[in-house]
Amino acid sequence: MTLALVLIPAAAALACFVIRYDALRRALLVATALAHLAMTAASWMKRPVPALGGWLAVDAGGLVFLSITSVLFLASALYALGYLKREPHGERKDFEEGVLFTNAPEAVFTGCLLFFLATMTLVTISQHFGLLWVAVEATTLASAPLIYFHRHDRSLEATWKYLLLCSVGIALALLGNFFLTVAASAPGGGSIPLVVADLMAQAGKLNVPWLKAAFVLLLIGYGTKMGLAPMHTWLPDAHSESPSLVSALLSGALLNCAFLGILRIQQVCSAAGIEAFGREAFIAFGLVSMAVAAVFIIAQTDFKRMLAYSSVEHMGILSLGVGLGGDGIFGAVFHAVNHSLTKGMLFLVAGNLLTVYATKSTARVRGILQLVPASGVLWVAGFLSITGAPPFGTFVSEFIILKAAFDKGYTVVAVTYLLLLSTIFAGMAAIVIRMAQGKAPEDQGPSRAEPLLALVPAAALGAFVLMLGLYLPPFLGRTLHEAAIMLGGS
Amino acid sequence: MNTWFDTITLLLILSNLALLGSSQLGFCIRVVAVQGIALGLLPILFGSAEWSVHAIVLAASALVLKGVVFPWLLFKALRAADVRRETEPFVGYVLSLIFGVVALAVVLCMRSRLALPVSADLRLMVAIAFFTILVGFFLIVTRKKALTQVLGYLVLENGIYAFGTTISSEQPWLVEMGVLLDVFVAVFIMGIMIFHISREFDHIDTHRLARLSDWNQGETEESNP
């Protein structure tokens, strides 16, 4: 079962390259997404047995991130049905610069999408640091062709930056793994396997200076992939140029996978009694990311870039939560869930807006509520949720992190955090409200029909995050707590 | 065995300095290939006590990838893009060389401070591995052509590979992971991307890949109203 979680999407991905009918491939995409979600749900009922000698196992932390990935992938797969139908075949004009371009073949797109799911699943269930590294690297491999789906120069530029920056990050993480090996090898010969459980059990024997060095390298390496500032520069480009459903997956699922990589090493560091070492780094990265995001969100002229910077902000919040420790870690894990659902919803709606208005400019999109009312309502609701307005789940998790900051006596951090959150709220409000209200352009007509497949996935994600704000199901709460305790929180 | 080590160490130092000081892309590709071949031999030298199949397969795959496949791909990209040399890097060649010498001095000074579970004669190798990593970083940051950045990345990754091999007696799969990284680079970054970049832009200057930025939005707004 543990193996099947990875193998089924991988097999489906291979099949996509062989199948010659678009309809069949699309059906396979949704069927695989459903099967994956079913297996994930079954893992909630009863944790599957570890596979490959404990290298693959579903633990509480992994399960949370696995579920996020699975839910988001199903939403994106359903959205993809409508999206692929709308995408014209053959050459067409780019609406921003007027150059001609074509799409990558649909088989490549669907295949890579499924392969992307397989690799992200592998990240969430890897218990071995080497395997985790391979999996993170494979996610880069699978997602690069997705970003380069529209073959024009801007998406090429975005893909190049993504590949180069993330590859350097991944190379650093490999060096971090080597350092971890040094830390795990006793001077008199013999070494501890790099499996999380083994490392934690024998944490006392780890060589502390090398462990610290490994932590720093893994934090920077995976932090690049996670989009922590100042290593975030690939993120706005990749998110704004890729198709919206890919942006949703990148932001909602992939960034979390990289975050999990960092959490794993922090887990080992806590067991070795040096968790305080990483704290300041986590807090610093967190606040810097939020500050950078705030600067670029204000007066942002591209709404997909605005959402991308908002992802940088939320990755900062996650990092901050982990840095604070205690309840903060619970807040961070819970916030990861809320952020992913909300951001997935927002990117899918952004895709709808892009279809209707054919521009990413915040200045030229006006009157969404009048022209496409359903998307408009989702857009405003998503904005409220992402900025942490009650009663959404994001409000609760952001509040838990704030409380943790005050409880631990980090008053300056807490005040800065609040200031940045309110700045970002104000910055996004100015943009989003102006887009939603006002008069739609004359040539667009009074209102447009909205395809159901473009609305339902986004609405479902939104409803989910709204529910989490009002009522946290006990089974979910238990697992989130278990994950937080596993990571050294409470 | 020790002479072999010394030769490889020396080769690494010289090739790094050559890369820092040269503008000819073709020459740089050859230097990186030589570096790759030298590093490919490393696992065999370590495994000399027991000539395991494992070590030989590892060495062979590294040799083929770094010594044959990469240079071939890069030369192909070079011809497709029709460029000969790196023009006007962000940091000049003399300054680059000075950086190289300083970095070499620093890692050699740090060598004695590293508490590594390896024998004393391997310490030098570890220090040079770090030097190689630094040079790789430097090349990525200071050069403009996509091709030179890829070369810088390969150098960075050669350094990591060298470091991995010296400690690989502990966990052999680590080096295989390094090889995996190679495959990744070979398939993706170099092969596909450079072809596309040269086709789309008629050049492979990465500093002109600057359409997507939050800094120059004012300009673009004016240019296409």
Image (cartoon, coloured by chain):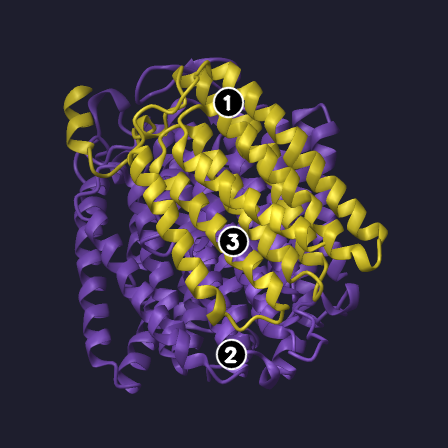
Q: Colour of chain A?
A: purple
Secondary structure of residue under mark 2: helix
Q: Position of residue A177 (x, y in %)?
A: 57, 62
Residue A27 horizontal side relative to residue A323, left or right: right
Residue A184 horizontal side relative to residue A331, left or right: right
Q: Quadrant of the C terminus of chain B?
A: top left
Q: Quadrant of the N terminus of chain B?
A: bottom right
Which residue type carries mark 3?
Ile
Residue A399 horizontal side relative to residue B216, left or right: right
Say which quarter of the image contains residue A405.
bottom left
Which residue type carries mark 1?
Gly
Which residue: 58% across, 79% down? A206
User: Where residue B128 is drawn, which disc sits there?
Assistant: 3
Which residue: 79% across, 55% down? B48
Q: CA distance from mark 3 to mark 2?
A: 24 Å
Q: Which chain is yellow?
A: B
Q: Position of residue A246 (x, y in %)?
A: 48, 40
The residue pinned by badge 1 equals B26
Q: CA distance from mark 1 to mark 2?
A: 44 Å
| Closer to the eye: label 3 or 2 | 3
Say which chain tag 3 marks.
Answer: B
| Label 1–label 3 contact, CB within 8 A | no
| Closer to the eye: label 1 or 2 | 1
Q: CA distance from mark 1 to mark 3?
A: 24 Å
Say which chain tag 1 marks.
Answer: B
Q: Is disc 1 in the same subunit as disc 2? A: no
Check the image and report above or below for A259 versus B214.
below
The residue pinned by badge 2 equals A208
